[in-house]
Image: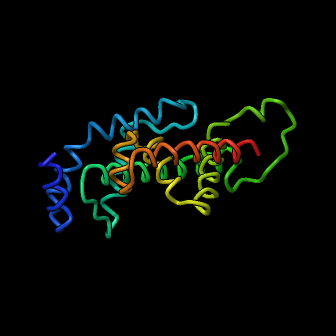
């Protein structure tokens, strides 16, 4: 972990080579996280593990004020970036499915209701998280880090500067709020 922290410090000082080495060092872990997220709902998206990790890299490369302090903060940002990428992709797919800029026609069949529900679900979860963020932003961070980032309670606690017990309470609260929001 000392090597990762040293790479992060050098990358924060503007060393592009250190940034690339950092990403290369954490690439297997980022692929594992992306793979776990994408295999939960395979039909939800046409994204694959490599594309999601590479898009995450590009988000990092374009983030000018990103200053992670350690591995956990790096992975926490990765979780947030992956969520953003997946939501943007789902929005684009939903727009394409609805014809994008094409003229819309009403299709009155049961088949139409079953097409492409995965993107809708991702967007509903995203909207629910945005609503929860208005109540308590930390709950959303816990969901992002746990669900999208695959971090455990201790890692999340370290990133947020709280106890793991607080993280477990936040996770339970977030799950209840998400369930309620998704029922509507």
For residue 25, side relative to residue 103 (left or right): left
For residue 35, side relative to residue 133 (left or right): left
Q: Residue at x 72, y 53 (%)?
A: 102
Specify whether residue 60 is in view. Answer: yes
Picture coordinates of residue 53, whole percent (x, y): 35, 44
Between 14 and 5, the one lying in front of the other is 5
For residue 127, side relative to residue 54 (left or right): right
Quadrant that contains the N terminus:
top left
29 is higher (above) or lower (below) than 80: above
Specify whether residue 51 is in view. Answer: no
55 is higher (above) or lower (below) than 62: above
For residue 157, side relative to residue 173 (left or right): left
23 is higher (above) or lower (below) than 64: above
Between 89 and 179, the one lying in front of the other is 179
Picture coordinates of residue 166, whole percent (x, y): 46, 49
Picture coordinates of residue 39, whole percent (x, y): 48, 29
| Picture quadrant of residue 175 | top right
């Amino acid at each position: 972990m000392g090597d990762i922290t040293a790479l992060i410090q050098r990358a924060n000082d503007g060393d592009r080579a250190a940034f690339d080495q950092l990403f290369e060092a954490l690439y297997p872990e980022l692929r594992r996280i992306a793979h776990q997220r994408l295999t939960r709902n395979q039909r939800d998206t046409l994204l694959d593990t490599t594309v999601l990790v590479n898009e995450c890299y590009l988000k990092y490369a374009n983030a000018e004020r990103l200053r992670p302090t350690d591995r956990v903060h790096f992975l926490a940002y990765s979780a947030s970036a992956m969520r953003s990428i997946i939501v943007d992709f789902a929005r684009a797919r939903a727009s394409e499915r609805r014809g994008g800029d094409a003229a819309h026609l009403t299709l009155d069949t049961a088949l139409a209701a079953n097409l492409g529900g995965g993107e809708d679900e991702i967007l509903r979860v995203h909207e629910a998280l945005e609503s929860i963020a208005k109540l308590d932003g930390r709950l959303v961070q816990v969901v992002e880090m746990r669900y999208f980032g695959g971090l455990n309670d201790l890692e999340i606690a370290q990133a947020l500067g709280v106890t793991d017990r607080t993280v477990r309470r936040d996770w339970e609260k977030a799950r209840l709020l998400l369930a309620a929001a998704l029922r509507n």
